[in-house]
Amino acid sequence: MAFTLSGDDAIHPVPPSPVPDPYWVGFSSSAAQLIGIPLNAAGLPQDPAWLALLAGNTLDIGSQQFPNPLASAYSGHQFGVWAGQLGDGRAILLGDIAGQELQLKGAGKTRYSRMGDGRAVLRSSIREFLCSEAMHSLGIPTTRALSVVGSDLPVRRETIETAAICARLAPSFIRIGHFEHYAASQNVDRLKELADLLIQDHYPECQPSDEPYLDLFKQISSRNAILVAQWQAVGFCHGVLNSDNISALGLTIDYGPFGFLDHFQIDHICNHSDQGGRYAYHRQPQIMHWNMACLASALIPLLTLNHSEEEAQTLLKEALDHFPTVYAQEWQSLFRAKLGFSTSEDGDIQLIERLLQAMHDSRVDFTNLFRGLSSISLNSALDTIDLRNDFINQPLIDQWFSDYLLRLRAESSDDVERKHRMNGVNPKYILRNHLAQAAIEKAQNKDFSGVATLLKLLEKPFDEQPAFQEYAIAPPPNLATIEVSCSS
């Protein structure tokens, strides 16, 4: 387990706070298999004591015990401004199980709750649960969500809501903010210990290096560059890319006011608290790069163990400068695959950018457009391509489709093989906000069937699933502008 730093006052032992009469809201059998929980025919744990454990009401489940639950401090930049000490204000790490760390989000107050109540509400917990598992099924690195447990315990937000606890799994919950915390407090011993533990447990390839901390930075930066390119390729907006919300393992973490793009807008803002658009869709790569700069700054004290400060800054800056290259290579590769190209040609990027601009101008549905491209035949006449009708500027998009078909013919693309490849990277189903909201409204009336249906659907996002065709339809205008904030 990562947080074993002895004598560290930034790690606080704290038990979860029990909730009255807990009940299952959602449970992921896929995540359960990751840690070997035996399940019954209903897909729930055979041992009913798991409900009490994942509610935070016990720390003992047969032979599996969690005697040392804890919360940790971290620091970070929020909306580009140094926020000082933050921390696990409502997340409590129970401990290790089968190589994963098990954390309860919404399990009560900790030393780092500040003015908060340490609780999470049902709506946000359902959203995090569903999106964590959806992202995993899309092949995007993420923390996992084992369950959502509800309780009728009242929680005050804008209105009175009910409490819920989301059980999260990850190989480690270390954040960029943990490094920033020790760097800001000038605690080089703890900073080094944290980096050494991360290398030992998760980046062993850095151990034999002459520059292990520089290599650690390069690995973390590359993982997060690739991660944000994967987000862009499925139209995912995180919403709050503060440095304390960035995983040191390159995982998607902290699902708050996230959203998948419906009608494509390059500058889409999914968090209505983000009035300046700092975390808009098109700015996510830039902001992730900025967060890696925060990490680089935090690691300077470790490089100065063997270098002057000027040398350390130069080495880290050179490493940081690789981020845009790694991102661009991954983004280009992913979008070539989305268009069905099996080769790389000089004009591909311009072709991709022309399509995205046309989609932006016409507010075309992101997911359905790319999924629909797989049905185009090399010999298609333009007037038989139904996707043309989604665009306002017909001459412009007709020219694009003409150029696209020429590009496919140039590499002798096979229609059947290409369709198979494209449907393996362009999902048919994503967690659209209006679908999540419908499931949440049912759950608020103690009907959890919508949560179960979406979980099942999103486990196979690339499959056709004829019984769920309506879930692939873009939202109607009255549901297309659902806004989500940080309040949860």
Image (cartoon, grey):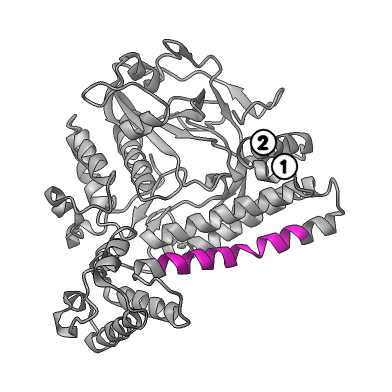
Say which residue appears at 40% left-offset and 50% top-offset: 139
Q: Which mark is residue 207?
A: 1
* Front-most of residues 61 and 255: 61
**In this rendering, is residue 65 above or below 195?**
above
The answer to whether 322 appears left or right of 395 in the picture is: right
Tell me the quadrant of the picture where the C terminus can be found: top left
Question: What amino acid is found at the position of numbered circle 2 in the picture?
Answer: Gln
Image spot of residue 48 (x, y percent): 30, 15
User: Residue 200 shows which numbered tag?
Assistant: 2
Looking at the rendered structure, which numbered label has been put on residue 353?
none
Closer-to-camera residue (385/301): 385
Determine crowd level at label 1: few under 14, some 14-19, many 20+ residues with C-alpha closer than 10 A: some
Q: Where in the figure is residue 35, as x and y percent of width and height?
A: 42, 27
452 lies above or below 261: above
Is residue 161 rendered to the left or right of residue 245?
A: left
What's the magenta bit mostly, secondary-structure-wise? helix
Chain-order first, disc 1 or disc 2: 2
| Kind of residue at badge 1 | Gln
* Quarter placement of the N terminus: top right
* Range of magenta residues: 315-335
